[in-house]
Amino acid sequence: DQQVKQNSPSLSVQEGRISILNCDYTNSMFDYFLWYKKYPAEGPTFLISISSIKDKNEDGRFTVFLNKSAKHLSLHIVPSQPGDSAVYFCAASARTTGAGSYQLTFGKGTKLSVIP
Amino acid sequence: NAGVMQNPRHLVRRRGQEARLRCSPMKGHSHVYWYRQLPEEGLKFMVYLQKENIIDESGMPKERFSAEFPKEGPSILRIQQVVRGDSAAYFCASSPISGVEGMNTEAFFGQGTRLTVV
């Protein structure tokens, strides 16, 4: 039973355009969401996070949007750059709502390719 | 301040041998998490440890797998009598405090150990 789903295994975007990566979750106990970026042969690197008390968090070119009613979040990258090409993982945790609050539940990832 | 250090980066073991994966958390971090990534899959939680304590091992297979985080030295993930299905990337992460306190504390990941069982 996949609690965090990234339904697009891959995405190609032209340099300078917007990249939109989507993530859906099923566990209503999740209240904290994170995006990690991963290059081949490296560990995941934290990118940006959002608490369930917010619906938007912005950091430079990266913005995460959260729609709690739809149990959906998205990562927007504007403008996209070739160096953004990587696998992006969505992760969620139940930080304040229950046992296992430290556990991160990951999606399967979306491979983003930014074409110069 | 070095990041999370994992070694070895690559480990090849024959079926039936033991695999030992090491993780040194970031300086000042006392919480360690192990995750496993199978091919074409996301990372799956295995175990959460603090110094000398296993807090949650609900993601660990019941047999052959064990983990420790001693008072001195790195955290060790140990896999006994490895089988081909154990082949995966094993990632360690650390954080200064756990999410239990409700703080927005990110976990920092190491580069992983890629275990190949032949």
Image (tube, coloured by chain):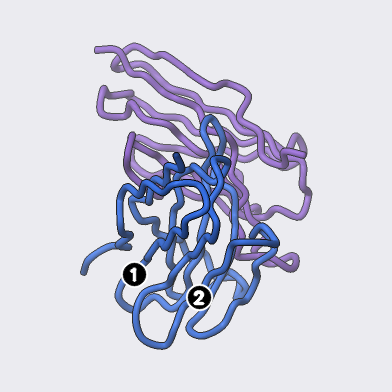
Chain colours: A purple, B blue
Which label is found at residue A72? none
Q: Which residue is at a point 43% across and 74% down the rendered structure image? A: B96
Q: Chain of mark 2?
A: B
Label 1 crowding class (10 Å Cα cut-off): few <14, some 14-19, many 20+?
many
The answer to which of B106 and B116 lies nearer the viewer is B116
Element assignment for label 2: strand
User: Looking at the picture, does residue A96 appear above or below residue A15?
Assistant: below
Q: Is residue B71 left or right of residue B24?
A: right
Residue B64 x/y as whole percent: 61, 61
Determine crowd level at label 2: few under 14, some 14-19, many 20+ residues with C-alpha closer than 10 A.
Answer: many
The residue pinned by badge 1 equals B24
Residue B28 appears left or right of B1: right
Number of numbered callouts drawn: 2
**Quarter of the view holding residue B116:** top left
- Check disc 1 and give the amino acid type: Ser
| Earlier sequence position, callout 1 versus callout 2 | 1
